[in-house]
Image (cartoon, rainbow, N blue to C red):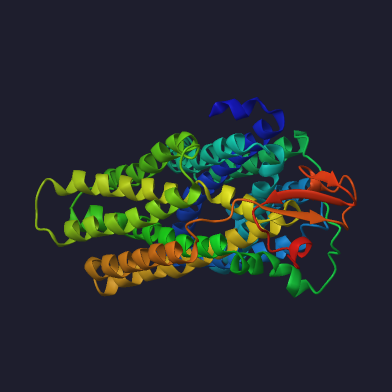
Amino acid sequence: MLSVLRDRTYRHLFAAQVVSLVGTGLATVALGLLAYDIAGADAGSVLGTALAIKMVAYVAIAPAVGALADRLPRRVLMVGSDLTRATVALALPFVDQVWQVYVLIFLLQAASAAFTPTFQAVIPDVLPAERDYTQALSLSRLAYDLESLFSPALAAALLSLVTYNWLFLGTVAGFLGSAALVVSAVLPKPHASDVPRTGRAYAKATAGTRLFFATPRLRALLALNLAVAAASAMVTVNSVVYVRHTLGLGSAEVSLALGAYGAGSMAVALLLPRVLERVCDRTVMLRGALLLAVVFAGLGGLTTAGSGGWRWPALLVIWAAFGAACSMVLTPTGRLIRRSAPPEERTAAFAAQFSLSHGCWLLTYPLAGWLGATAGLEPAVVVLGAIALASGLLAGRVWPSRETVGVEHEHTSLHEGHPHLIDAVRVGNAWRHSHTPLPDALHAHR
């Protein structure tokens, strides 16, 4: 898997992702302490509102980024996003009002919504080989999981030496380091299209979303996003309830439970590159979604069970299984989008995935919290488990079991050297090649 790091450009971009994630993790810890300083006992409501603002920013800003992607150089967009995030993080220690926190969080997450889809769309151009790209996706999944484990530990170590305000400087350093690494990377030129990119801003902003609804496998991905959101919401929102209230354990065990989720995800991310060489994406992703429903059934049994020392190790196993199943769905997602979108529309497609997936979390996060708090954990498990099961079954229904791998066709209006003709052969006055059907303007009449 580490062989892809031999590519200098990818190595710099991956390092940018890692230092950016560490900075974000430090900011998460520091933000909780800042909220407590400002709001005291109401810190939970402040953080809950901040999380909602984060999701709203992701859902609203990412499509706009897809609309602007063809007008701004990708390096400028990513570096500008990092510098914006660094500036916001530098301002956070000086706020003393709750509304100021909300404004800065929106700006911070809006910049993240610009950076992440652009970064994701660059990687397929840097690593065009399927095997290399799959390994890169697994490394990215590992980076997210390791950050969730490493950043809190780093923050705890730093807090033993300095006050929490200094953590924001670590966040600033992470974003500035990310910007420097992006600047140092030699990015491939973006794919240009002969199809005019004029039109209304609304049409451009919704291009990626329309691509999702026009492509069966991407429609299935929408359902799979909802299944993953149901499981991750249960883990994120209710881990502390299960550990502290249901099992009567301490704060350290909460960290262990979240660590078990991350460990399950990392284990699958390490295994998937080899698995995907033999098994298709559809099989892996659908089985991951159905495994989520099975794990919810196990969680239901744990939730309704009486006392017993077996429940704590059982919860760790269940949380690890949730992480493994989510990773089975999430890790191949980039491969699916790359195969479904022409190169010049990848940023819009990744932006749509970023926006739509976070829209699912915007639904399931409050649902998990509200049901758990008002109706109890049992109804929360039933409802979220039903969502995961229904979403997995829907994905299997709308994703054809035997997709056409390649359709041979010809292009007569594209000039020699056009990026879409990279594997085409000249036949008379036309260029002939085959690929998975694409619902774009180049193939609108096919």
Residue 336 image offset from top left, x and y in percent: 57, 52
Residue visible at 54% across and 60% down?
217
Residue furthest to the front: 428
Q: Quadrant of residue 97?
A: bottom right
Residue visible at 37% across and 58% down?
231
Residue furthest to the left: 307
Q: How many marks?
A: 0
Work out whether 393 lies above or below 330: below
Answer yes or no: is residue 105 visible. Answer: no
Residue 66 image offset from top left, x and y in percent: 71, 61
Q: Is residue 76 left or right of residue 270?
A: right
Residue visible at 18% across and 56% down?
302
Q: Judge by depth and name the residue closer to the eye, 185 or 271.
A: 271
Answer yes or no: is residue 439 visible. Answer: yes
**Quarter holding the C terminus?**
bottom right
Q: Is residue 140 left or right of residue 160?
A: right
Residue 333 image offset from top left, x and y in percent: 54, 51
Work out whether 301 lies above or below 371: above
Q: Quadrant of residue 265?
A: top left
Q: Judge by depth and name the residue closer to the eye, 387 or 396.
A: 396
Work out whether 382 lies above or below 28: below
Q: Judge by depth and name the residue closer to the eye, 116 or 7.
A: 7
Q: Is residue 284 left or right of residue 252?
A: right
Residue 92 image offset from top left, x and y in percent: 60, 54
